[in-house]
Image: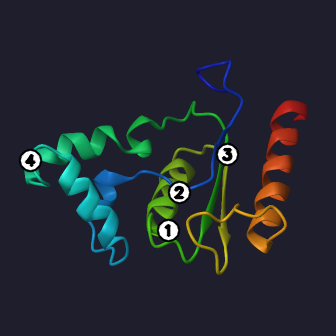
Amino acid sequence: RSAAPGIRGIMNIYGATEWDYYMSSEVSDGEALVNMIHKLLPSNGSKDDEEIYSNASCSTYATSDSPPILTLHGTWDTLVPIEMSRHLHDVVDSLNVTNLLVEVSLEEHGLDFGWYSVGGQITTYAMERFVASQLLG
């Protein structure tokens, strides 16, 4: 069980924030996102921001006591590159945390817009089963 007993699970629908990984890697997608982040930071994206990137990264706070995590991410997401969610999945896997990364093919960032779309149906199905497994499991 989780170190925070009131939290039974985490559902991440729009992609993980893995800035420490993303800003130090060669990930090619998400240029618009990087430009936006640089504009928001006081230093405009210098190396001085490494601590900020680390503090804003989910994996910084992951431990072996983290609650189960469900991540849904569109493979065509141009806002938050799917590599961020893959990185978080790898980190929590290495900590033996129960987690599932569902890569929704051909879906953008708003993969759940339109509950009757393919992305919406996959999102609904995965979320329903995740909640049931954490409440009834």
Q: In the image, is residue 19 above or below residue 28?
A: above
- Which one is in front in this view, the residue at disc 4 or the one at disc 1? 4
- Give the colour scheme shown: rainbow
Residue displayed at 54% across by 35% down: 64
Q: Where does residue 35 sit, x and y in percent of width and height?
A: 24, 64
Q: CA distance from mark 4 to mark 3?
A: 37 Å
Q: CA distance from mark 1 to mark 3?
A: 19 Å
Mark closer to the chain start, 1 or 2? 2
For label 2, the residue is 15
Q: Where does residue 74 sit, x and y in percent of width and height?
A: 60, 70
Is residue 86 rendered to the left or right of residue 129?
left
**Looking at this rendering, what residue extends furthest in the front direction?**
114
Q: Is mark 2 in CB contact (under 8 Å) with mark 4? A: no
**Looking at this rendering, what residue extends furthest in the right direction?**
136
Residue displayed at 53% across by 44% down: 95
**Looking at this rendering, what residue extends furthest in the top direction?**
5
Query: Can you tell which mark lies on residue 13?
Result: none
Amino acid type, mark 2: Gly
Instruction: Give the quadrant of residue 60.
Output: top left
Q: Residues within 10 Å of mark 3 (few under 14, many from 20)?
A: some
Query: Can you tell which mark lies on residue 82?
Result: 1
Query: Can you tell which mark lies on residue 43?
Result: 4
Q: SS at mark 1?
A: helix
- Which one is in front in this view, the residue at disc 2 or the one at disc 4? 4
Q: SS at mark 3?
A: loop
The quadrant of the image that shows the C terminus is top right
